Image (cartoon, helix red, strand yellow):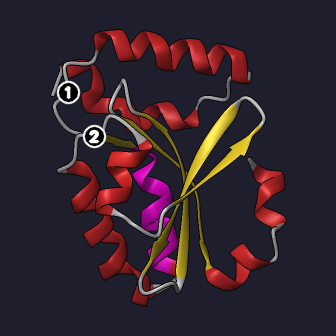
Amino acid sequence: MSKFFAHAENCTKIILPLKIFKKVVDFLSTLADNERMIVVGKDKLIKFFKKHSDAKSPVLRWLKTVEQSSWTSFAELKRTFGPADMLSGGERSYIIFNIGGNKYRLVTAINFKGQLVIIEIAMTHAEYSKDLWKGRL
């Protein structure tokens, strides 16, 4: 992993307009020498499983699997996480993972070229079903 990405999680605290964010991600993709996926926003996962302690084990299992992967497309990701869904949200697409036997949902944005997984929202299935989270993307 490059030194540049060693502190990539800190970047989740920066709020950028979508067009600039996309340019930053594309630029980072050109710098990437990653053979495996980099997960940005792990702090959201930690906060989530502190609130939902039974989610800790399945979330950490998901995280380990992701960090050991090197997908280049959604089709490849589906071979690992069959129930994952893609949701197009305007200029951006999101990948939604079922975690913990369908008890939890994890919404991510993935840049396959740059090998980046950005954690957007972690929630319970009940929260997901209400669709209120879509306004937070």
* CB contact under 8 Å: marks 1 and 2: yes
Task: Give the vertical position of 59 relative to 29 (above or below).
Answer: below
Q: Gap in Å between the C-alphas at discs 1 and 2?
A: 7 Å
Residue at (36%, 24%) from the top-left corner?
A: 114
Q: Is residue 50 above or below residue 13?
A: below
Identify which amino acid the numbered label 1 is placed on. Asn
Q: Position of residue 70 (x, y in %)?
A: 23, 40
User: In this image, 41 relative to 59: left or right?
Assistant: right
x%, y% of residue 77?
35, 51
Residue 52 in the image, given as x and y percentages of width and height: 50, 84
Answer with the quarter of the image where residue 64 lies. Answer: bottom left
57 to the left or right of 105: left
SS class, disc 2: loop
The structure residue drawn at horizontal position 83% and vertical position 66%, both measured from the top left corner, is: 132
Instruction: Pick the quarter of the image with the N terminus.
Output: top left
* Left or right of 130, for residue 105: left
Q: How many other residues sit within 10 Å of disc 1, few (<14), some (14-19) or many (≥20)?
A: some
Q: Does the magenta-highlighted stretch encompass residue 22?
A: no
Q: Amino acid at mark 2?
A: Met
Residue carrying label 1: 34
Q: Secondary structure at mark 1?
A: loop
Eyeballing the image, is 58 above or below 83? Answer: below
Nearer to me, 78 or 53: 78
Q: Nearer the viewer, residue 89 or 122?
A: 89
Q: Which residues are magenta?
A: 40-50
Q: Residue at x 75, y 78 (%)?
A: 129
Nearer to the camera, 19 or 5: 19
Q: Residue at x 46, y 77 (%)?
A: 50
Near-viewer residue (13 or 70): 70
The x, y position of residue 58, in whole percent, is 34, 78
Reading the image, the residue beneath label 2 is 37
User: Which numbered marker is on residue 51?
Assistant: none
